[in-house]
Image (cartoon, grey):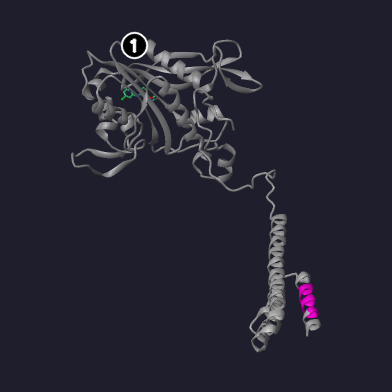
Amino acid sequence: MADDTDTRLSDTLGAIAASETGDALEAIRIEALGKKGWVSALMKTLGGMTPEQRQSEGPKIQGTRAQVADAIAARKAALADAALDARLASETLDLTLPAPHTPKGSVHPVSQVMDELAEIFADMGFSVATGPEIEDDWHNFTALNMAETHPARAMHDTFYFPDRNADGNRMLLRTHTSPVQIRAMKAQGAPIRIIAPGRVYRSDSDATHTPMFHQVEGLVIDRDIHLGHLKWTLETFLKAFFERDDIVLRLRPSYFPFTEPSVEVDVGWQDVGGKRVLGGDGAAPGHGWMELLGSGMVNRRVIEMAGLDPDEWQGFAWGLGVDRLAMLKYGMDDLRAFFDGDGRWLDHYGFGAFDQPTLSGGVGAAS
Ligand code: 2NL
């Protein structure tokens, strides 16, 4: 029986060492240590022994049981280690691989330019004012010294709503962001330094006009403000925006009902390889002027209608098209593509969300 046990023990230990899976090992354990296993059967023989026999056989049988149990535990640990090693070897992560291309949004050039404008003017002490796109004709026209008969009030320019508001005013889609500035003057009083960027609407649609477009207006009201302040402000802004020190302005007399005097502002351009590039004296040979924005000293009637005393407060204002500004700076040549929402156009002309314009890092985004 001792020989028998020794043979079974060495067979079992050999099978344990040769086992390749947890299942195979478990089968061996059941065969040896299970209720009906051969080691368990050996243990049961102790009950029928004399005390002397038990004394000599007991430690042997216990030793056999312990050897089998220890061998199984050791093999189990070895198999688990091997399995972990195999997993670690197969589940590698190559950190040198390029990031996968995942679809992501981009910042529209109009939003990018508006952010750039806000950054530049914030540095000159301007804050950003916003207001409703659905306006009444008092804030959009009357307060801006535009009489009932003014051509801009004609139906073909303005989108009117069919109903009047509670005060009997006609409602419309704002045709410029001036009403935002009227509201800001009435709410904040003077002095004031704001820009008002946003969507505006005109019933006009062709190659260079869309029924909705973007405008930014600016307004400064303070004591002793004159045209020199206007010219310096616009020059400083345009140099920062186009990131060129050689921006030259030409002021031409013009007419707007809301400013007096009114000035149209041209920027000098030069021919660089067949392309018009802003910068340089527009009067030089091969150079020219490009009309960029309208401005002027705020009409005293407008200051009055905004609730301020025009003998105490003066100021200047300007307005310009954001879409055109974006086209000039970033080289898009078709305005209509701006508002198609075509993913390919946005992939090409859009900006990364992390390309925040800053004066220190440059207001022009990298891509
Ligand atoms: C343009 C240029 C302009 C203004 C807008 C303005 C606003 C207030 C008072 C006075 Cl609250 N003016 N805005 C001034 C001059 C020009 O826009 O070409 N407009 C048709």
- 161 or 198: nearer the eye? 198
- The image shows residue 348, relative to residue 195, as above or below, that is below
- Magenta segment: does it hold 35? no
Q: Give the range drawn in magenta.
A: 6-15
Left or right: 83, with 164 as reference point: right
Element type at mark 1: loop
Question: In the rendered image, which quarter is residue 57 located in?
Answer: bottom right
- Whereabouts is ligand 1, in terms of quadrant? top left
Left or right: 214, with 150 as reference point: right
Q: Quadrant of the C terminus?
A: top right
- 245 or 175: nearer the eye? 245
Would you name the residue on which mark 1 appears? 226
Amino acid type of the residue that numbered disc 1 sits on in the rendered structure: His
Residue located at (45% from left, 26% from top): 119
Badge 1: residue crowd in 10 Å (few <14, some 14–19, many ≥20): some
The main secondary structure of the magenta stretch is: helix
- 24 or 210: nearer the eye? 24
Q: Quadrant of the N terminus?
A: bottom right
**Percent of width and height locating residue 117:** 45, 27
Left or right: 308, with 201 as reference point: left
**Percent of width and height locating residue 170:** 25, 39
**Percent of width and height locating residue 184:** 28, 28
- The image shows residue 343, relative to residue 25, as above or below, that is above
Left or right: 167, with 191 as reference point: left
* Residue 149 shows up from this direction: no
**Percent of width and height locating residue 5:** 77, 81
